[in-house]
Image (spheres, grey):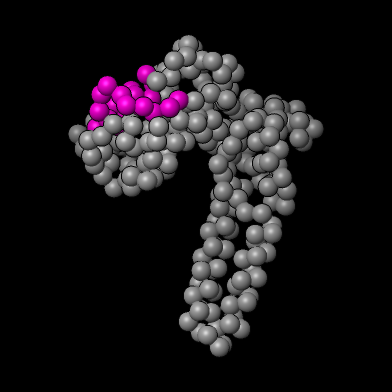
Amino acid sequence: MDRVELKDIDSEDLEDMLLTIEKSFNIRFVTPEIAVETFGELCDCIVNKINLRHEESCTTQQAFYKLSKVVAEITNSKFDQISPSTVISEVFPEQIIVYVFKLLEKSLDIKFNILYPSKDFNKFLWFISISSIPLSVFFWKSGLSLLVLSTLMLWFWFRTKQNLLCMTFGELAVKMTRNNYLKSRRNSNSINKNEIENILTAWFIDDFDLDETKLNRQSQFSWSTNCSVITKN
């Protein structure tokens, strides 16, 4: 069976993900007894480091319950009026979305890690774009470079904003579970060991744009190493 060889993943990107995993599961990677050569071994390494009671309950469902309850408080509505398929833009307009996410993060004591620019930053980018036009008249290379850079940044922010507004609360609950696993659970002193590998698999597929039909436990990294090397102690 074909499998994904995880050789195209940049080591720094992988380390960033592992740091996020540490925060999400409240663990620290130290020198393990076994080397992490495959995706399956990495999943086992993570599960074995979480020394909490096992409970058969879906963390994503619990995350959605917590999320919808806070949204209901913000909107003064009943939390059962929000479903996993409800689109964020149907509840919150674009003008207040930054403020809303700050409230959500504060109320839930989590970080969604969703990059979203402030209005001041948007204004700054527009200012650079407009200023680059007269600059290009006298210093065309500098002006053109500045214009291209600011245009690319504006496009990136616009795309991020649209992706966020089009996201459903169910998708947001999934992201909340990945980045804040323990805080997403009703009992933060428990885990569902049976769901950890599935969460990590979906995480790798989404973040590294992998073929979901080929990523499996035998997928190999490009080097033989251990957790203490690919993340900081």
Using the image as rendered, state which of residue 207 and residue 226 is in the foreground. 226
Residue that appears at 63% across and 75% down: 130
Outermost residue to the front: 233
Q: Position of residue 129 (x, y in %)?
A: 60, 72
Q: Horizontal and vertical percent for residue 107? A: 69, 31
Residue 177 image offset from top left, x and y in percent: 52, 30
Q: Is residue 146 above or below residue 139?
A: above
The residue lying furthest to the right in this view is: 76
Q: What stretch is highlighted in magenta?
A: 27-48
Identify the residue at the far bottom of this view. 138
Quarter of the image where one finds residue 211: top left
Residue 22: percent from left, percent from top = 45, 30
Residue 4 visible in the snapshot: no
Question: Residue at horizontal 49%, vertical 25%?
Answer: 26
Side of 74 where 11 appears, left or right: left
Question: Can residue 72 be spotted in the picture?
Answer: yes
Rendered position, 181 above or below 5: above
- Residue 76 image-quadrant placement: top right
The count of marks equals 0
Q: Answer above or below: position of 147 versus 103.
A: below
Q: In the displayed structure, does residue 178 sit left or right of residue 5?
A: right
Question: Looking at the rendering, in which quadrant would you find the C terminus?
Answer: top left
Is residue 119 magenta-colored?
no
The reply to whether the magenta stretch includes residue 28 is: yes
The relative height of residue 162 versus residue 111 in the rendered view (above or below) is below
What residue is drawn where x is 43% and y is 27%?
28
The residue furthest left is 1
Task: Examine the image and state in which quarter residue 154 appears.
Answer: bottom right
Quadrant of the snapshot with the N terminus: top left
What residue sits 58% from the left and 77% below the top? 132
